Amino acid sequence: MAGLALGYYARQCGVPATIYEAQERPGGLCVTFEHDGFLFDSGAHRFHDKDPGITRDVQRLLGEDLRVVDRPSMIFDDGRLMNFPFRLTDVLWHLGPRALARDALDMAAGRLAGRRPEPESFAGLAVRRYGRTLAERFLLNYSRKLWGLPCESLSARVSGGRLNGLDLRQFLLHTILGRRRDRRNADGKFYYPTRGIGMLTDALAQGFGRDAIRTGIEVTRLCHDNTRIRAVVVEGQGQVAVDEVASTLPVERLLAMMDPPPAKGILELARKLTHRDLILVALFLRRESVTSAATVYFPDPSFAFTRVTEPRNRSAAMSPPGHTSLVAEIPCDSGEPLWSADDADLAGLVRRPLEQIGWIREGELLGSQVVRLRRAYPVLSLDLESSMGAILRYLGGFENLTLAGRSGRFEYGWIHDMLRHGKDVVASCVADRLGPEADVA
Ligand SMILES: Cc1cc2nc3c(=O)[nH]c(=O)nc-3n(C[C@H](O)[C@H](O)[C@H](O)COP(=O)(O)OP(=O)(O)OC[C@H]3O[C@@H](n4cnc5c(N)ncnc54)[C@H](O)[C@@H]3O)c2cc1C
């Protein structure tokens, strides 16, 4: 997304550019797959209206194919679906009045103790916002499965801003005193293209010029003189001279490609940067509908998957008429045996529990598809900040190298952030050439 955005805005401004993409198909982590008339995305994607300039660009790009969808998400807990954002009846049912009161008192005591700095760890943040019981049951369980690490070792930034404006205090004020809640991150409204999130990356690729994207070509080396990148080495073509380089490669891979290599210490820090991989299991059903939610979260550790999406709840065109599909996400590390398990076994790992909870009935399952996504999430551990500081200082020393993208900058990023990276990189390029008044429309 970041690389294609960069190419798209570069083309808009008449800045010549070439994109090298290792895969046969552009789009990276933001693509839509097709299976016998069913469409499903590379994980549960939504486009959020957080950056007005970027939203306008996306609206212009997709026209009527960009629709507003109003589908809140839900949590599956203890055999029942629970609304998210929480409702009092749900919370009382799931936690009981005692636990809720205990959490509320904990939080009130914390507030009376005075202003404290924001917690650095995700565990600290979740407990501060929701109290121990609610956080443990719905947020910490889920995050342990997603990241594969104790939440005490995860940076608060893994929340990706999702907990902003969402906490038990606000929830109680809203429910009991009838105050307006800050719903900025909580409501179920988002944008979605009619035929999947891949329409957006396809439109960017089209806008850039599909022929200028060299797919199936890996970048293997960046040759430099310690101040500037002089050339990149690309598979099958040898050295290509460059003026400016924007890298959306995972930053640790970029460091390993620098020629001459960085100091040993930098390479050692780079080895500490890890990613979480993701297995998607899509099940195709002869059935009109299973849920009404955009996404259903499964914090309970007894389920191998973290969440399940029903693509037709985002757009009816995602399934043939009278049919639907369920897409489960199983986070893991590519070194684990689970990653290389048979597709049939992985499909069973999702199908069986969904049959048990009644989401799939006998004779409804038409088929399945498994997709493996490498480096789906950069793991933002607590000790990351110090490593990234040194890495960014080293890479910042190259005057014609810019980092963009989620793994490129090793930070939590949304689609609108990726587009913003692309737009800003082009804007600074144009400003260098034409002066600071130049604009990226
Ligand atoms: C499961 C999931 C759900 C998400 N849901 C949402 C959502 O609902 N809303 C939202 O806003 N965001 C969401 N995101 C985030 C969004 O998808 C990512 O931020 C975005 O796709 C990252 O784009 P990128 O360009 O940084 O990286 P990538 O998509 O990883 O692109 C990097 C590209 O570099 C290529 N590459 C790697 N090495 C080489 C090499 N040596 N030579 C050439 N090419 C190479 C890769 O093949 C890849 O195409 C989600 C992400 C995931 C994984």
Image: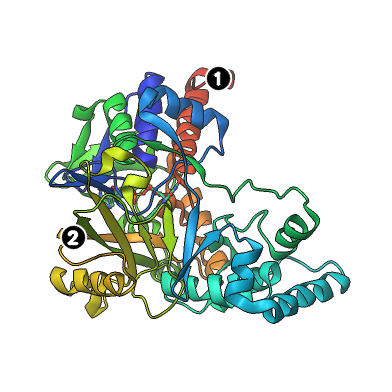
Task: Label 2, secondary structure: give it.
Answer: loop
Q: Nearer the viewer, residue 40 or 378?
A: 40
Q: Quick check: can you spot residue 311?
A: yes
Residue 114: x and y, percent? Answer: 87, 70
Q: How many angstroms separate mark 2 from mark 1 (CA)?
A: 62 Å
The correct choice, above or below, for 259 with respect to 205 in the image is below
Picture residue at 57% right of the left edge, 47% below the top? 187
Instruction: Say which residue label 2 marks.
Output: 364
Residue 276: x and y, percent? Answer: 37, 67
Q: Nearer the viewer, residue 425 or 45?
A: 45
Of badges 2 and 1, the one in the foreground is 2
- Picture disc at residue 435: 1
Mark 1 sits near ligand 1, with its Cβ under 8 Å away: no
Which residue type does callout 2 highlight? Glu
- Picture disc at residue 232: none
The correct choice, above or below, for 236 with respect to 363 in the image is above
